[in-house]
Image: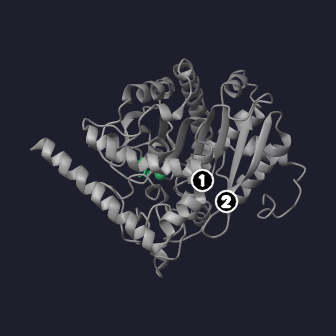
């Protein structure tokens, strides 16, 4: 698939020069990202595996790369990174490209890289939303500032295409009074007709669940604002039980970045930024069962006038500075989790003061995990939500659950 979008089947002679010297000082296009991965695949000295996790709505491949030390083994603890969920946040895939370059090519001869590969395998999806990304390179209203995917099924108006992929993941989907998603296709935060209605989120869900037992940490790169966020995003009323752990590991990044003069805001997602349900981070934590799941809002700072339009001249310094923060994060994660045997089912996905609420919410995510473990997650998921009948049944049972939670909560406060 790497060849599909490239004009020439072979690399031009100056490809090394092109990528070594120019990839960090410019935003790569979709075909350039594929070509970059192809280059890494053939030139890395460590173990890399490049492939596609599936197709986007418009049929583009969603590339992944797995980077491991040459003596790695199946099931080794993995850091999972994704980028480009929102297409206009160009610095995000640029960050993923930087990470891939650092880990797989290590042209800076950074001694820490060996350690990083010793500690973890790295699984990276640099562009979760390729259709949207391609769209942002076009002119006009639906051009540079496009955020969602390019699904055309929910509206005939081109301004109203697409679903916000970060409202479409299947955990607490649309499920709080302030869920931060919209049911209007014209909205920039349209959450889709149901969770995992989009091929992009479905492909991610499948990949995540099939790696569930060895993902030690998850980071989704977004922009902008300089926030380091942990769950929960779906509601600001629910606290995460192990907040001190999540905070401690993330603060390694935040402290390191501060020394480089980047001030990051660290905290629970809904409280620190705003409530938004259906995000990938909540899903990774709540259903996949990864304890350390984060969303990072890259530069510029929230007060910057640039917003999503971080100038190309800033790319190089931002991604190489952020790499330092990521290294600190990985070392801290390793250090902090080394003593505890790695078992993702050890902790409880959702907690709050109320035990009853805990049980109800856990039941939902636990069932999803059980189904995933039974075998083909995709079949399970597709069967359970694409058939209208079953979907309605599911919705009704969800409504009942939600009602119980609400009743219980109000009885507590009254
Ligand atoms: O709204 C979002 O999806 C993210 N912010 S952005 O400006 N990049 O669009 C924040 C997502 C935080 N995580 C959750 N709310 N689950
Ligand atoms: Zn975003």
Q: Position of residue 154 (x, y in %)?
A: 46, 76
- Compared with 341, 168 (above or below) is below
- On the image, the x and y values in percent for residue 193 come to 43, 69
Tell me whether the residue at label 1 lies in contact with that at label 2, contact meaning CB atoms closer than 8 angstroms: yes
User: Quick one: label 2, few (<14), some, or many (20+) residues within 10 Å?
Assistant: some
Element marked by disc 1: helix
- The answer to which quarter of the image holds residue 9 is bottom right
Image spot of residue 125 (x, y percent) = 64, 48
Question: Which residue is at a point 37% across and 40% down the rendered structure image?
Answer: 350
Relative side of 47 to 132, left or right: right
Question: Which residue is disc 1 drawn over?
Answer: 206
The residue nearer to you, when weighing 55 against 361, is 361
Q: Mark 2 — residue?
A: 54
Q: Looking at the picture, how far across and down is residue 25, in whole percent? A: 66, 44
Local crowd size for mark 1, using a 10 Å CA cut-off: few (<14), some (14–19), many (≥20): some
Q: Which quadrant holds the C terminus?
A: top left
């Amino acid at each position: 698939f790497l060849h599909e979008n490239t004009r020439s089947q072979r690399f031009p002679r100056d490809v090394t020069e092109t990528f070594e010297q120019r990839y960090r000082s410019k935003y790569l296009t979709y075909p350039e990202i594929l070509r970059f991965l192809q280059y890494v695949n053939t030139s890395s000295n460590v173990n890399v595996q490049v492939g596609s996790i599936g197709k986007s709505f418009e049929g583009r491949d969603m590339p992944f790369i797995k980077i491991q030390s040459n003596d790695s083994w199946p099931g080794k603890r993995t850091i999972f990174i994704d980028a480009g969920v929102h297409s206009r946040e160009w610095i995000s895939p640029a960050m993923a490209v930087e990470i891939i370059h650092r880990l797989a090519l290590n042209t800076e001869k950074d001694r820490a890289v060996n350690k990083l590969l010793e500690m973890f395998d790295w699984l990276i999806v640099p562009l979760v939303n390729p259709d949207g990304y391609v769209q942002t390179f076009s002119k006009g209203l639906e051009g540079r500032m496009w955020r969602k995917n390019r699904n055309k099924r929910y509206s005939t108006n081109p301004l109203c295409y697409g679903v916000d992929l970060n409202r479409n993941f299947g955990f607490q989907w649309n499920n709080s009074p302030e869920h931060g998603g919209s049911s209007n296709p014209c909205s920039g935060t349209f959450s889709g007709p149901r969770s995992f209605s989009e091929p992009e989120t479905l492909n991610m869900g499948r990949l995540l669940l099939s790696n569930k037992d060895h993902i030690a940490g998850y980071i989704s790169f977004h922009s902008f604002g300089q926030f380091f966020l942990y769950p929960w995003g779906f509601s600001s009323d629910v606290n995460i039980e192990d907040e001190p752990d999540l905070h401690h590991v993330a603060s390694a990044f935040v402290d390191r970045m501060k020394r480089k003069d980047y001030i990051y805001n660290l905290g629970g997602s809904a409280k620190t930024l705003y409530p938004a349900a259906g995000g990938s981070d909540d899903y990774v934590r709540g259903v996949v069962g990864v304890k350390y799941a984060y969303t990072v809002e890259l530069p510029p700072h929230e007060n910057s006038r640039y917003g999503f339009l971080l100038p190309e001249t800033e790319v190089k310094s931002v991604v190489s500075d952020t790499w330092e923060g990521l290294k600190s994060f990985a070392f801290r994660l390793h250090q902090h989790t080394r003593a505890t045997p790695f078992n993702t089912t050890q902790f409880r996905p959702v907690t709050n003061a109320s035990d009853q609420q805990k049980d109800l919410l856990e039941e939902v995510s636990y069932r999803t995990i059980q189904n995933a473990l039974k075998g083909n997650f995709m079949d399970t998921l597709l069967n359970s939500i694409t058939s209208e009948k079953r979907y309605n049944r599911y919705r009704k049972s969800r409504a009942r659950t939600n009602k119980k939670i609400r009743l219980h909560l109000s009885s507590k406060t009254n």
